[in-house]
Image (spheres, rainbow, N blue to C red):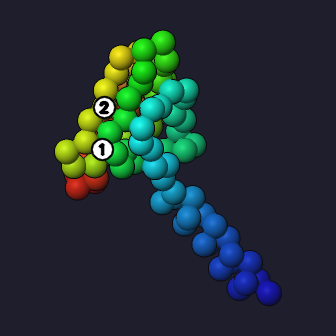
Amino acid sequence: MKKLYLIILTVFFTGQLIAQTMVSGNVSGTWTLDESPYFIVDDITVSSGKALTIEAGVMVLVGKDLSINVSGTLNVNGTEAQPVTIKSPSDT
């Protein structure tokens, strides 16, 4: 029975480590470290009158030839200890 629990816990935690949030289209709200990395799979837009906040430590992976368009407000709250990282998935 211990082996079964160990297997279940391993699968659960491994899934958590490689989890990612897929995003596209209009975005707003807060991107949290808990839901990181964020994988941009199509162009995204922060529309006028809307705001997107990216918390410290969040990783954003941007697919090839995609755009991040900001007509509203973009708040990137990285710190020296926990920077926000924005890069191509091929750079990981």
Task: Assess whether mark 1 and mark 2 are in contact (beta carbons under 8 angstroms).
Answer: yes
Q: Residue at x 49, y 17 (%)?
A: 50
Which quadrant of the view contains residue 75?
top left
* Label 2 sits on residue: 68
**Mark 2: secondary structure:** strand
Q: Crowdedness of circle 1 by 10 Å Cα count: few (<14), some, many (20+)?
A: many
Image x and y of residue 47, in percent: 42, 21
Q: Which amino acid does label 2 sit on?
A: Ile
Q: Crowdedness of circle 2 by 10 Å Cα count: few (<14), some, many (20+)?
A: some
Measured along the vertical axis of the image, is residue 90 above or below residue 26? below
Furthest-left residue in this view:
65
The reply to whether residue 85 is visible in this rendering is no
**Mark 1: secondary structure:** strand
Closer to the camera in the image, 30 or 79: 30
Q: Which residue is drawn at 48% across and 60% down?
A: 18
The quarter of the picture where the N terminus appears is bottom right
